[in-house]
Amino acid sequence: MQRRHDGKASKIRDQFTEQEKRSRINHSKRSVGRHEVRSWTAAAKESLCLMWQKVKVQLMLSMSVLVAVCWYCRRLYSFLAQLLKRWSNYLQRKLIRNLSVLTEVDLLGYSAREWKGETKQAKHMREAYEELFWSYHIKYLRQVRKDSYCVLRAVLFQIFSQGIPFPSWMKERDILKLPEKLLYSQGCNWIQQYSFGPERYTGPNVFGKLRKCMETLKTNVELFLLAYLLEVKIRVYRLHKFNTEEFQVNCPDEYRREWNEISLLTEDDRYYHIPLFRT
């Protein structure tokens, strides 16, 4: 009996020993597996870190290049914009200098730009412009080149733009015959007494002097002479005479009813602009 019992106990111990061996083997295998997983994960992390370091360097280099390119492009754009603006302003100034009559501009806007400040003269001129705007329905104006020809340019521009016919004497081929025509139509005394500045048209060479004046187009001619020559009524708004009886004058005072009417605007009786009416 004892032997049987010892044999069974030995078998049981052998079974436990075998199971323990198997358990240890399995635990060892699992440990090896976990270690291999950890080793692979560590290797992957290390590879990713190395790859990120390389990518980071390339990315930082690319960003630096991009920032440098953007900065250069911005400076280049700014330079080209300034160059284009200067060139545009130069062309505009040159174009304006070459234009006899500019495009129409808002009357009150022009007044605000030209007469800034709170001086007595600036206030007076702004009030005069406002009077033209509200009471005379002048809403726009055309600037005329400021030189000794401006009054002639302003008058002729309106004659052409409004389709006003020229007087009959201008149909003559030889415009230099004008002095004789004036002589016979207006009278010798009127011609001989007329003067341009220091030059008096008297004496035997009166026609030669008048022809010379016409050839050189010295437009210091008075508005009355232009009105009679072109057979138009010229109405002048004199802003520096605002609030006086001379604010609005007609040239000439007496004219034929069939004469067409044109208008001028002046701030100082030297340079003239073209007022535009809107109802």
Image (cartoon, helix red, strand yellow):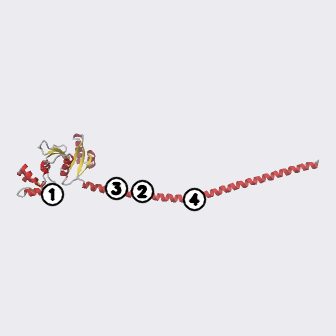
- Lower sequence index among marks 4 and 1: 4
Q: Nearer the viewer, mark 2 or mark 1?
A: 1
Cα separation between marks 4 and 1: 85 Å
Q: Earlier in the sequence, mark 3 or mark 1?
A: 3
Give the residue at mark 3: 85
Q: Nearer the viewer, mark 3 or mark 1?
A: 1
Q: Is residue 96 visible?
A: yes
Q: CA distance from mark 3 to mark 4?
A: 47 Å
SS at circle 3: helix
First in sequence, mark 4 or 2: give its number.
Answer: 4
CA gap, disc 4 and disc 2: 31 Å
The residue drawn where x is 55% and y is 58% is 56
What label sits on residue 74 in the rendered view?
2
Q: Which residue is mark 4?
A: 53
Q: Earlier in the sequence, mark 3 or mark 4?
A: 4
What residue is drawn where x is 59% and y is 58%? 51
Kindly check if marks 2 and 1 are in contact, taking CB atoms under 8 A apart as contact: no
Q: Secondary structure at mark 1?
A: helix
Q: Of label 2 and label 3, which has the lower sequence position?
A: 2
Position of residue 173 measured from the top left corner of the image (x, y, whole percent) = 13, 53
Marks 2 and 3, Cα distance to the nearest angstrom? Answer: 16 Å
- The correct choice, above or below, for 192 with respect to 248 in the image is below
Crowd band around label 4 with a 10 angstrom C-alpha radius: few (<14), some (14–19), many (20+): few
Label 1 sits on residue: 216
- Against 279, residue 268 (above or below) is below
Identity of the amino acid at label 1? Answer: Thr
Q: Position of residue 133 (x, y in %)?
A: 24, 42
Res. 44 mark: none
- Answer whether labels 3 and 1 touch (C-beta < 8 Å): no
> How far is disc 2 from disc 1 in space, using C-alphas?
54 Å
